[in-house]
Amino acid sequence: MENSNLIYQRKSIRSFSDRRISTITIEEIIQDAQRAPSWQNSQPWEVYIASGENVKKIRSGFKITNEAGKTDLTTPHRTSRSELSMNNIKEWSKSVEEAVGVEGTDDPEWVDARNNLFYAPYLVYLTTSKKASEFTIYDMGAFGQTLMLSAASHGIGTIPAYALSNHPEIIKKELSIPQDQEIVVGIAMGYANNSKINNISTKRASVKKILHMKE
Ligand SMILES: Cc1cc2nc3c(=O)[nH]c(=O)nc-3n(C[C@H](O)[C@H](O)[C@H](O)COP(=O)(O)O)c2cc1C
């Protein structure tokens, strides 16, 4: 990774082409991600990547199930979020509508992409031991973000998504993930296509709202 602007270049990609990534590049991205900090350098992560036939099987498994599903990690209910987060989510919905149109996340192109796991040629699953403590989530998040920034440095798009891991039993079967591992997040990876749903430009709350400095 060479360019600090990568932090600003990275954005979630929700529709991918089927262009392949070389194995060497994938290994470089994972090696970069390994530079993430972790408690006592415990490096509690493992990475399982589906490609080719595996992706097709996972995709069709999700379609057959066609239910809401349940991730290994518990998910927060919308109404249990802070006011700060609720406001940010409202702003996000506006950014989606600006790029996609008034239907927002009900737009047919959006729904089709989500139902097909964004047509991603690679599904990257970050797992950790079920024995891990809550603090491990910090390590896993750092790993995921480093991975996505490294991918961006290669011109490769990513999105971390709940929608990719809400049927963990299907993923674990297809990727032979041991039952003592839990899936923390799924990240779709590949080259972006020119769909309008990739044109979303998200904003962030003002620094003043979140920064509390005292002298
Ligand atoms: C844990 C997590 C789960 C997410 N799940 C989804 C999802 O299921 N579907 C989706 O379209 N985006 C999902 N996202 C992407 C966020 O919407 C996105 O990161 C956020 O709007 C900021 O936009 P940016 O990534 O383009 O900067 C998820 C992001 C995170 C970190």
Image (tube, grey):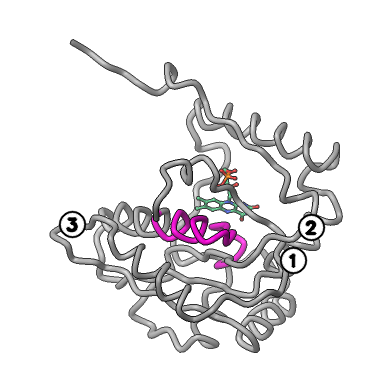
Coordinates of residue 188 in the picture (x, y in percent): 58, 65
Q: Residue furthest left?
A: 40
Q: Label 3 is placed on what type of residue?
A: Trp
Q: Residue at x 30, y 65 (%)?
A: 34
Q: Label 2 is placed on what type of residue?
A: Val
The reply to whether residue 162 is visible in this rendering is no
Q: Which residue is mark 3?
A: 39
Q: Residue at x 68, y 60 (%)?
A: 192
The residues tagged by marks 2 and 3 sit, at their Cα atoms, a distance apart of 38 Å
| Label 3 Cα crowd, 10 Å radius (few <14 / some 14-19 / many 20+) | few
Q: Residue at x 66, y 70 (%)?
A: 120
Secondary structure category for the residue under label 1: helix
Q: Which residue is mark 2?
A: 111
Above/below status of 91 relative to 134: above
In the picture, the disc for residue 115 is: 1
Residue 147, quarter of the rendered image = bottom left
The residues tagged by marks 1 and 3 sit, at their Cα atoms, a distance apart of 36 Å
Q: Residue at x 46, y 43 (%)?
A: 7
Q: Is residue 38 left or right of residue 60?
A: left
Coordinates of residue 95 in the picture (x, y in percent): 70, 34
Secondary structure category for the residue under label 3: helix
Q: Nearer the viewer, residue 180 or 97?
A: 97
Answer whether residue 71 is magenta in the image: no
Answer whether residue 158 is magenta in the image: yes
Residue segment shown in magenta: 146-165
Q: Is residue 6 left or right of residue 38?
A: right
